[in-house]
Amino acid sequence: MNQEQPIIVGLDIGTTKIAAIAGRKNEFGKLEILGFGRANSNGVKHGQVLNIDETIKAIRMALDNCYASNPNLEISEVYVGIAGHHIKSLQTRGDIVRQNTEDEITQKEIDQLVADQYKTYIPAGDQIIDVIPQEFAVDNFQNIISPIGYGGVKVGANFHIITGDKNAIKNISRAVEKSGLQTKDLVLQPLASAAAVMGQEDLEAGVAIVDIGGGTTDLAVFYEGILKHTAVIPFGGENITNDIKTGLGVLKTQAEQMKVQFGSALSNEAKGNAFITIPGLRGMPAKEISVKNLANIIQARMSEIMDFVSYHLKQVGLDNKMLNGGIVLTGGGAQLKHLIQLTEYVTGLNARIGYPNEHLAAGQIEELARPTYSTCIGLILKGYSDYEHNRKQFEKTHVQMEIPTGLKTPEPVKEEVMVTEEEKQITRVMNRGGIKDFWGKFKDGIIDLFKEEEDHAL
C-alpha cells in the first residue's frame, strides 16, 4: 500500500525561514518524512513576499537542501502556506428559500448557498480566499452541522469568509512558479498549523491555535468542532529581535542569539544577577547585558501579542472559560522560555505547546517535531486530504522510496512490535474520520481562483 501513496511537498514561505518538507503516509496513516530542506528567508516581511528575486533564491536553496537530504526525490508540485497582515476575515449570513420543499436538502443546494457568499462585498483590491460554513439552520432547527437529508422551506448558514490582497497572493504564486514549481494549492497558514498540532478532542473541546512566526502571529479559533475565527496579528519573533537590538544597542544577529539562548517571556523568572557578555565591535570594550533587562523587553512585546489574542477571543465571545482546550502555542516563537505562564496570565486560559508530532510516524528526526515546522507538516496533511477526496487527480504510479538515514533517528535496539488486529481496526477508524475531515470543511483549490482570473485577463 505504501508505494501507492503520493509524495506530497509542503512549502512554508516565512519571514525568517523557507522550509520544504516532502512526506508520504505509511500504512497506519502517519507521515513519513522523505526529504527536508530549509533556507534563510530575505525577501519576505510580515508574511508578505516583497522581493520576488530574493524569495526565489531562498526557495531554490531550500529545495536544493531538500534534494541533498534525499537525491531520489522529484518535486514539481507544492502546497504553499499564505499569511501576512493583509489577511482578514468576516462573518456573513446566507439563506435560500427552497423550491421543492417536499424533497430532502441536497449537496447541490449547500454548494449554491456557499457560492452565493462569493458575491459578498469586500474592499477593492481584495479577493475572497475561502468561504467556510459554520453552522446551518433549517426553518426553526438551529445549529445543524450538516443539513443534508433534512426537509424544510428555508435553509441558511453562518459563514466565515477569509479575504486577502490580490497582489500579495499573486506575488507568492509568481515566486513559486519562477522557482520551477507549480502551486497545487494556497492554504491559510493558521489552518495548516492547526491541522498539524490538533487532535479530534481539541476540535470538540474548543481551542485557540496561536502560531507565532517570524513576521506574524496567526490565530485560528475552534469551538464545538467549528472554525469560529481567524486572524493575522502583524507581530512575531522578528519584532522581538528588533526590540532587543534597539533596546540594548546590539547587532541583529546578537539580538537573535540572545533571545534564543537566554530569553524568557517572564522577567520575574529571570535572574537579577545574571549577565551576558557581548564582544565589542572593532576594538570597542565588551558589553554586559542584564538577563533581566532582556526578559523585560521580550515580555513587553509578547504581552502585546497575547493582548491581541485576548481581543480577538473577546470579539467572538470566547474569552472566558468556554475554550476547554485552552490555547495551543506553536510556530518558532512558541519555543521561548516561560511563554506558557505569560500566556495563561494574560489570557486567563490554560496553555500548552503544540508539536506537529500528532501525525508524524515514529523514528523521524527530532528537529521536524519542533513547533517551527507545524505549518509545513500541516500543508502536507492538506495535500493528503485533497488526495483522499479525489484520488483520480493523482497519478497511480509512484516511486517506491525509502526514508534517508539522515532523516531517521538512530534506532538503538530493533524490537519487533506486534500490532494486534484490534489496534489495526482502531487505526482504520481513526484514518477514516476525525481530524482527517478537518480539511473537508474548507474549500478545495484556492489557487484555482487566481488561475481562472488570470486566464480571463489573457
Image (spheres, grey):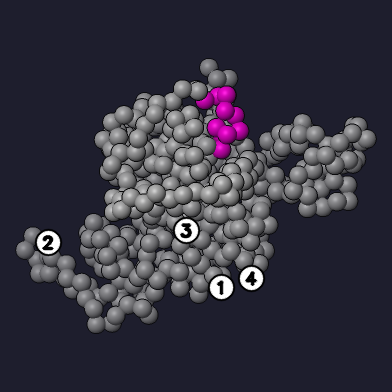
Name the outermost residue toward the right: 102
Residue at the outermost top position: 458
Q: Position of residue 235 (x, y in %)?
A: 44, 57
- Does dot 2 land on a helix, a strand or a loop? loop
Question: Residue at (17%, 71%) from the top-left corner?
Answer: 277
Tell me the number on the disc at residue 321: 4
Residue identifier under label 3:
354
Residue 345 in view of the camera? yes
Give the amino acid at mark 2.
Leu
Query: What is the three-letter code of the residue carrying label 4?
Result: Lys
Q: Give the range drawn in magenta.
A: 385-394
- How far separated are the C-alphas under marks 2 and 3? 39 Å
Which residue is found at the position 55% from the left and 24% from the top?
393
* Residue at image mark 1: 348
Per the model, the C-alpha gap separating discs 3 and 1 is: 18 Å
Check whether the beta carbons of the residues at disc 3 and disc 1 lie within 8 A of each other: no
